[in-house]
Amino acid sequence: MAFENVHDTQSKGAMETLSKQNQVKPPMNKYLFIAFGIAAVVVACALGILLLQPSNEQIDEDLLAGAFREGSPEFAEHTKGLVIQTDENSTTQSPTAFGTIVMFLGANIKNYTGKNIVGLEVRASVVDQLGKPIREKTLIVVPKQEKQLAPDSKIYVNVRMDGFNKDEDRADIRWKVTAIKFD
């Protein structure tokens, strides 16, 4: 009988262990579903905030609202006192690892208009020997680089242009004012 008691005790212990192993654990799927739901809400909120932000083009338009643009009758008169000179010492070119060439164009812009400039957009062009543009880049100089350009003062502008082929005829650099806004 003692043997049977020991056996019964061992059987009960084994049964309890087996019963504990077979118990249903709380489902982890429930917690994963909740975590994914919270993550989806956070991502949706972040995307919503990003989509509400104005685009770069809209910001640029707001900066130059009311500016005299190229082609308007007053534009030529207002830009007569603006001088843009290419800075030959800071204009460089360099090959890239992809076999293309990157150019850094530098220029000084001088304000002889007698007015305070609060908005200035310029276009830098690399042209061939016939004057045909190879690459162009338009940028807002004032108020992005400086808040304003006072009368009889100057500002330095540096533009990076990349993607030139080695065999392209990069004969000259041209600068042009495309928009100007006064105080």
Image: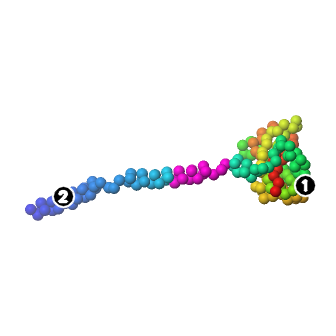
Local secondary structure at mark 2: helix
**Quadrant into which the N terminus falls:** bottom left
Q: Which residue is mark 2?
A: 11
**Quadrant into which the C terminus falls:** bottom right
Viewer can see residue 173? no
Of circles 2 and 1, which is in front? 1
Q: Quadrant of residue 169?
A: top right
> Which of the two discs, 2 and 1, labels the residue nearer the N terminus?
2
How would you rate the neighbour count of disc 1 (Cα within 10 Å): few for under 14, some for 14-19, many for 20 or more?
some
Q: Which residue is mark 1?
A: 112
Question: Is 53 contained in the magenta span?
Answer: yes
Q: Is residue 130 above or below residue 147?
A: above
Most frequent secondary structure within the magenta stretch: helix
Please report the bounds of the magenta region as a residue range: 42-55
Q: Residue at x 89, y 47 (%)?
A: 77
Extreme-left residue of the structure: 1
**Measured from the top left, where is residue 149 in percent x and y?**
83, 57
